[in-house]
Image (cartoon, grey):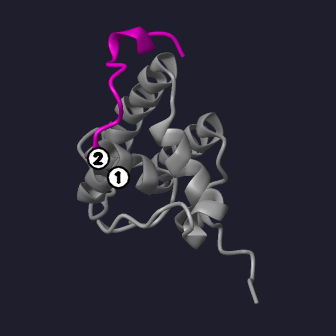
Amino acid sequence: MSGSSAFSDAPLADAEKTDVRRFCGYPAIGSVASGEDSWRFFTAYGSLEWRMNNLSSSELMQVRLYLSQIYPLETAVVGASANLDTGKAAVWTHNPNEVRDRMELYVLWRRRLCGFLGVPPGPDMADGSRIVV
């Protein structure tokens, strides 16, 4: 995507890291520092943490560009619920698939962020068709 040069190349702030984690489908990790010997650092969780802490300047700008795209998509899904009780008003007709369509677009961009960071989508983005025993 072009236009990422308009974004900061400073290291990600804690709030941005939190957003990257949740948009990539990973749970909160808490505030207690737990060294690299933690189980988390031998899984995709650790890969995500390592990458967020070691991105190049251009990669940091690109991540911020992804975040700037994802924030309004997340808000749009929530905002679409305002129309769920109205099928038609004057010449306006409600798209019955609006929430689903918006959610698909939101998830698409979240998956693109995961792909850019080189991590698999986290547990929150599981499609529910797999059973883990």
Side of 74 relative to 118 (left or right): left
Task: Residue 93: tell me if it is visible.
Answer: no
From the viewer's side, name the closer residue of 100 and 45: 45
The question of residue 10 being in magenta is answered with: yes
| In the image, residue 114 lies in the stretch drawn in magenta | no
When the figure is inspected, residue 75 is found, relative to residue 36, above or below; the finding is: above
- At a point 51% along the width and 34% down the height, the residue shown is 54
**Image quarter of the C terminus:** bottom right
Q: Position of residue 43 (x, y in %)?
A: 65, 62
Residues 32 and 5: in front is 32
Residue 132 sits above or below residue 35 on the image: below
Label 1, residues with CA under 10 Å away: few <14, some 14-19, many ≥20: some
In the structure shown, which secondary structural element does the residue marked by tag 1 occupy?
helix
Mark 2 residue element:
helix
Q: Nearer the viewer, mark 1 or mark 2?
A: 2
User: In the picture provided, is 4 more to the left or to the right than 109?
Assistant: left
Q: Which mark is residue 47?
A: none
Residue receiving disc 2? 14
Percent across and percent down for residue 41 are 59, 61
- Tell me which amino acid carries mark 2: Asp
Residue found 33% across the figure and 40% down from its top: 71
The total number of labels drawn is 2
**According to the image, label 1 marks what residue?**
18
Range covered by the magenta-colored residues: 1-14
Amino acid type of the residue tagged 1 in the rendering: Thr
103 or 56: nearer the viewer: 56
* Residue 21 seen: yes
Q: Quadrant of the N terminus?
A: top right
Do the residues bearing badges 1 and 2 touch, measured as CB atoms within 8 Å? yes
What distance separates the C-alpha of mark 1 from that of mark 2?
6 Å
